[in-house]
Image (cartoon, rainbow, N blue to C red):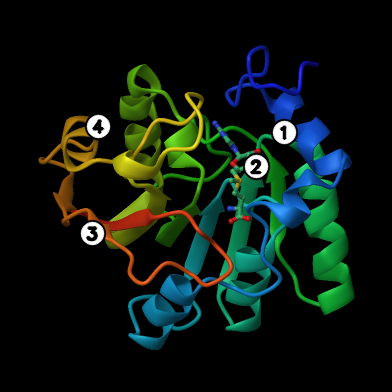
Amino acid sequence: MARNGLHMSYQDPSTWDERYRSGEHEGRWHRKYPSRELCTVVAAGLVPAGGRVLDIGCGAGTEAIYLAQCGFRVTAIDFSASAIDIAGERAREADVRVEWHTASALDLPVADRSIDFCFDRGCFHHVTQPDRPRYASEIARVLRTGGRLFLRGYDPGDVPTTNIVPVTQDAIDRAFDPIRFARGRVEVLVPPEPEDPNTFVGVFLTRL
Ligand SMILES: C[S@@+](CC[C@H](N)C(=O)[O-])C[C@H]1O[C@@H](n2cnc3c(N)ncnc32)[C@H](O)[C@@H]1O
């Protein structure tokens, strides 16, 4: 596979398998500690105690493991089998239970209306515009009424490669049907994390 970005597609799980197998994630998007925005969501009580949560595009599992340590019942999916292998091993080391699935965000292996909180750190911005309504309709299917999705993705002013589709208010409004979702404002998460030079945005969506 070419390493210059010209021949790799972020919509292809094998691209991600190679990135995880080579350890590229370690110096790039992977963090040993949960993100401050997820900790803030939990601290604010926005996830009901003992609730069922879903981490979409969980990667090497830091956020899913943290949510399990908080006492939530966690399902985590990623379409890279290599990511799920690493995440499963880390959960065993941390001695927490997470239900891991190698699966696409566009076809979630989760029962209808069973999830209280969905979290997405860096997956949605790899979903192309034509696929985003499908992503949103899967979230609508699995979230209970009043359940929330928090997603974080690249700010349009700071997209590092043409493979990434930034998260904008217009993109959110087009993908997430207002009959099914109350849509929050896309806000820049400031200040950027010290170890991360890029600017990200975050937005809440609530299932109606
Ligand atoms: C930038 S990484 C973020 C991983 C993790 N959330 C984190 O914060 O470390 C994006 C992840 O999304 C996964 N991904 C991308 N598109 C996906 C899709 N359509 N379905 C499932 N996983 C996907 C990739 O395999 C990758 O692990």
Look at the numbered discs 1 and 2 and tell me whether their residues touch, using CB distance below 8 Å: yes
Q: How many other residues sit within 10 Å of disc 3, few (<14), some (14-19) or many (≥20)?
A: some
Residue 113 visible? The answer is no
Q: Nearer the viewer, mark 1 or mark 2?
A: 1
Residue 10 visible? The answer is yes
Q: Report which quarter residue 78 is drawn in.
A: top right
Q: Is mark 4 within 8 Å of ligand 1?
A: no
Compared with 69, 22 (above or below) is above
Say which residue appears at 34% left-offset and 17% top-offset.
130
Amino acid on which disc 2 is placed: Asp
How far apart marks 1 and 4 lie (CA) works out to 24 Å
Earlier sequence position, callout 1 versus callout 4:
1
Q: Nearer the viewer, mark 1 or mark 4?
A: 1
Amino acid on which disc 1 is placed: Trp
Left or right, 175 with respect to 113, comes to left
How far apart marks 2 and 3 lie (CA) works out to 25 Å
**Residue placed under numbered mark 1 in the picture:** 16
Residue 38: percent from the left, percent from the top? 46, 72
Compared with 57, 206 (above or below) is below
Which is nearer the eye, 199 or 174?
Answer: 199
Earlier sequence position, callout 1 versus callout 3:
1
Q: Report which quarter residue 7 is drawn in.
A: top right
Residue 99: percent from the left, percent from the top? 70, 57
Label ID, residue 78: 2
Which is nearer the eye, 188 or 83?
Answer: 188
**Residue placed under numbered mark 4 in the picture:** 175
Say which residue appears at 38% left-offset and 44% top-offset.
158
Q: Is mark 1 within 8 Å of ligand 1?
A: yes
Q: Is mark 2 within 8 Å of ligand 1?
A: yes
Q: Nearer the viewer, mark 4 or mark 3?
A: 3
